[in-house]
Amino acid sequence: MKYNNVEIEDTFCEATSLFVSRVVLTASDSQTAMDEARYLSGFSIITAAPVQVCVEERVAEADTPDRRPGVLLQLNAPCALGLETFKRAVRERLYILPHLPTCSLFDAWPSTSAVDDIDLRGTVGRWGDGFEVNETVGERDVIRMPIMSGDMLIERRLKVGIGLDAVLEVFGRDAAACLAGARRATARLVELAPGVGVFNYPLGGISGAKVGGTAYTEEGVTINEVYCPSLKTRVVGSCVPAQADAVVEFPMVGLTEQALYKGLSLAIQDFCETMGILSITAPRFGGLWGDQRLALRRAFALLEDQDQQAAT
């Protein structure tokens, strides 16, 4: 498969099911909301952190519970880690909230198909040291907590649903091309892919890893040597093309499979339209990461359909 002369391998993403809590963080203005969303997202790759946090999209003040500008975030972790482990990790991450000036937080799970919820009253709510009060905003039960910039509202219960992930591996002539493509894809997904969260906003993309170790077998994750350009002539089975001097891994999390395919198609298009991008594939781990498969051919078909509609 080719798009704009960029080769797209006819393969699949190895995807895994995730527990997801979707929240909207609001603040006094849109820039503050995004700044604080990024702060809350920090240290959030599951290889090193107990919970991942992805930016999904900006939300206009007319569409948030407190009528202030906001940012949708997805807190997530693989289901294999266990529901109680995930819930504890979310509570611990959200303990940062009262430090964030003018911030409030509300549940944003989009349907009634949640599998559980997380009660924040006994953890984050205790930040109020007895000055917090329970209130109702619309039909939402919230905790009102005084902080230095005013009062913070925190929805007491956050729903937990099931999502899944997808990952692209993108080869470029150099790192500048890979980073430019990642920025471009991230911006488009945040604007045009509801239900899809991206890592490392606003840059997007990471340097990927493999499950487990080869030399250091006791490690849970290590470098994925077949995608390291400086090793392409030294390791057996290198996936890096001869002309490529950089690779970026582009992961995303979706609330549904349909949303993820939309996200994959947009990301593929943006990478393919970035100068210096050579080819795109997806990493596989022999089922060690996930037992679900998302075919790049299906994402490519969505892209072709979009182009045909635009042409007519």
Image (spheres, helix red, strand yellow):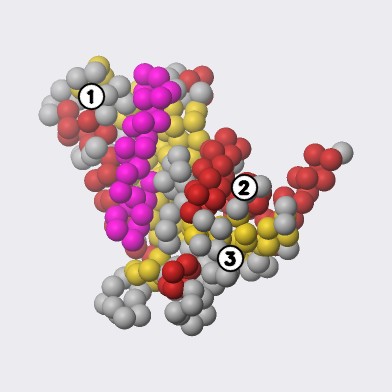
The residue that disc 3 covers is 243
What span is in magenta?
26-53
- Which of the 4 image quadrants contains residue 189? top right
Towards the viewer: 153 or 311: 311
Q: Of the two numbered discs 1 and 3 on the same chain, state the one appearing first in sequence.
A: 1
- Looking at the rendered structure, which numbered label has been put on residue 145? 1
Question: Which mark lies nearer to you, 2 or 3?
Answer: 3
Mark 2, residue position: 274
Label 1 – label 2 distance at C-alpha:
46 Å
Q: Residue at x 20, y 22 (%)?
A: 147
Q: Position of residue 41 (x, y in %)?
A: 35, 42
Mark 1 lies on a secondary structure that is strand
Report the Cα–Cα distance between label 1 and label 3.
Answer: 56 Å
Q: Is residue 215 above or below residue 241?
A: below
Disc on the earlier residue, 2 or 3:
3
Q: Amino acid at mark 3?
A: Gln
